[in-house]
């Protein structure tokens, strides 16, 4: 029994250390929203003109910065598409993934239907100081309320959107 308690304490300590490391890494890699980002008009691959303020006015918006060449994005992008298909408020930004035709082709090949703003030169991502893909930013009523980088689960995304709405 004493051995089991010791293992439990060590496991709890390891979990706390992992949580602290993840929290510090998110803080260090957090994107910085550019001035007046909420008023900036963006154009999706479908030609729709949108703004983050407009999209996040009624409910929180998940802005997902990804790239076709990103290894981790291969796992997170299908979950983002699933969230969007389930009615989640999502806008994605394809970072340095080619021109519009190449991004559309990549999405079709993967059988993904997402609202995508293409950022072929990385200009938009640079304005946000995105240094890691994938990056998830939650915007509510035109304000950034949380962000995270790296892998996150479908339920993690849903939880972040729910938390922003509370």
Image (cartoon, rainbow, N blue to C red):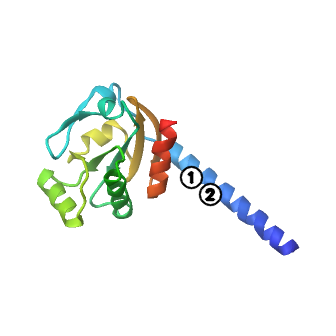
- Residue 55: which numbered mark, if any? none
Is any atom of residue 132 visible in this view? no
Image coordinates for residue 51, horizontal then vertical, percent: 27, 32
Does residue 49 show up?
yes
Query: Which quarter shows the N terminus?
Result: bottom right
**Residue at image point 49% right, 53% down:** 156
Q: Residue 3, relative to residue 72: is it above or below? A: below
For label 1, count other residues whose C-alpha is less than 10 Å away and answer few (under 14), some (14-19) or many (20+): some
Q: Is residue 32 above or below residue 19?
A: above
Q: Residue at x 56, y 52 (%)?
A: 22
Residue holding disc 1: 22
Nearer-the-camera pick, 108 or 6: 108
| Most foreground residue, 46 or 72 | 46
Residue 21 spot, x, y in % from top left: 60, 53
Disc 2 secondary structure class: helix
Q: Residues within 10 Å of mark 2 (few under 14, many from 20)?
A: few
Asked whether 135 or 4 is in front, the reply is 4
Residue depicted at 22% across the width and 55% down the height? 97
List the residue tagged with mark 2: 18
Q: Place residue 126 in its image quadrant.
A: top left
């Amino acid at each position: 029994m004493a051995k089991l308690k010791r293992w439990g304490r060590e496991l709890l300590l390891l979990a706390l250390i992992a949580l602290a490391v993840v929290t510090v890494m998110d803080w260090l890699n957090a994107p910085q929203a550019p001035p007046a980002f909420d008023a900036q008009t963006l154009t999706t691959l479908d030609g729709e003109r949108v703004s983050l303020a407009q999209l996040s006015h009624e409910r929180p918006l998940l802005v997902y910065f990804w790239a076709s060449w990103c290894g981790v994005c291969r796992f997170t992008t299908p979950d983002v598409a699933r969230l969007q298909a389930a009615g989640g408020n999502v806008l994605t930004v394809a970072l340095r993934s080619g021109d519009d035709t190449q991004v559309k082709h990549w999405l079709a090949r993967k059988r993904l239907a997402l609202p995508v703003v293409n950022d072929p030169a990385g200009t938009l991502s640079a304005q946000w100081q995105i240094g890691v893909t994938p990056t998830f930013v939650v915007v509510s009523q035109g304000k950034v309320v949380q962000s995270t980088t790296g892998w996150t689960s479908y339920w993690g995304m849903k939880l972040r959107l729910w938390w922003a709405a509370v």
